[in-house]
């Protein structure tokens, strides 16, 4: 279990023998390490989100192609309504439109809705903690 923090101003939270310059250097080094760690985590999150966005874009592109093809076949079926190939064109066109709708929905679901959400949350928590320590 964590020790409670003593907020009594009469007892400093640091070694009284340690010079202020050393404390400042330590704070700067820890801040530098924190920034480097946050940058590494942000890069990894961007890499993962880019892969998801790339996949979502490919699915959306495929859905758009299938939708255009399906719509074209439906229009051809409408033109050929007075002959037997119209039924086949209508079935194929309707199938392609269905694939386009499904692919569009799946592609949309794969796109990141809030980019870098984890990084934002970590930075907000770090900022809040820093603010509490300063005050």
Image (spheres, rainbow, N blue to C red):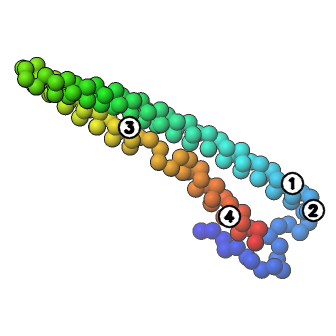
User: Which mark sits nearer the N-terminus, 2 or 1?
Assistant: 2
Distance (Cα) linking label 2 and label 4? 24 Å
Q: Please state which of the two labelled residues, at mark 4 or mark 3, is closer to the viewer.
A: 3
Q: Residue at x 76, y 72 (%)?
A: 135
Q: Residue at x 35, y 31 (%)?
A: 64
Q: Residue 70 in the image: x percent, y percent?
A: 25, 28
Secondary structure of the residue carrying tag 1 is: helix
Secondary structure of the residue carrying tag 4 is: helix
Residue annotated with mark 1: 25
Residue annotated with mark 4: 129
Residue annotated with mark 2: 19
Secondary structure of the residue carrying tag 3 is: helix
- Quadrant (top left, top right, bottom left, bottom right) of the N terminus: bottom right
User: Which mark sits nearer the N-terminus, 4 or 3?
Assistant: 3
Q: Residue 106 in the image: x percent, y percent?
A: 34, 39
User: Which mark sits nearer the N-terminus, 3 or 1?
Assistant: 1
In this view, the residue in front, 10 or 28, is 28
Distance (Cα) linking label 4 and label 3? 38 Å
Q: Residue 86 in the image: x percent, y percent?
A: 12, 23
Q: Please state which of the two labelled residues, at mark 2 or mark 3, is closer to the viewer.
A: 3
Classify residue 28 as left or right of residue 119: right
Q: Are marks 1 and 4 in contact (CB under 8 Å)?
A: no
User: Which mark sits nearer the N-terminus, 2 or 3?
Assistant: 2
Q: Please state which of the two labelled residues, at mark 2 or mark 1, is closer to the viewer.
A: 1
User: Which mark sits nearer the N-terminus, 1 or 4?
Assistant: 1
Distance (Cα) linking label 3 and label 1? 49 Å
Disc marking residue 107: 3
Distance (Cα) linking label 1 and label 4? 19 Å
Q: Residue 121 in the image: x percent, y percent?
A: 58, 56
Identify the image quadrant of residue 75.
top left
Q: Residue at x 47, y 48 (%)?
A: 113
Classify residue 21 as left or right of residue 74: right
């Amino acid at each position: 279990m964590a020790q409670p923090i003593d907020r009594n101003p009469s007892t400093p939270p640091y070694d009284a023998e340690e010079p202020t310059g050393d404390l400042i250097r330590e704070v700067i080094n820890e801040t530098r390490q924190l920034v480097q760690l946050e940058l590494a985590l942000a890069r990894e999150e961007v890499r993962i989100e880019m892969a998801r966005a790339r996949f979502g874009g490919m699915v959306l592109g495929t859905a758009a192609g299938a939708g255009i093809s399906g719509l074209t076949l439906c229009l051809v079926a409408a033109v050929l309504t007075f002959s037997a190939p119209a039924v086949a064109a209508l079935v194929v066109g309707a199938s392609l439109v269905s694939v386009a709708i499904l692919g569009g929905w799946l592609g949309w679901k794969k796109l990141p809705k809030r980019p870098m959400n984890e990084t934002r949350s970590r930075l907000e928590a770090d900022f809040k903690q820093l603010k509490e320590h300063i005050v």
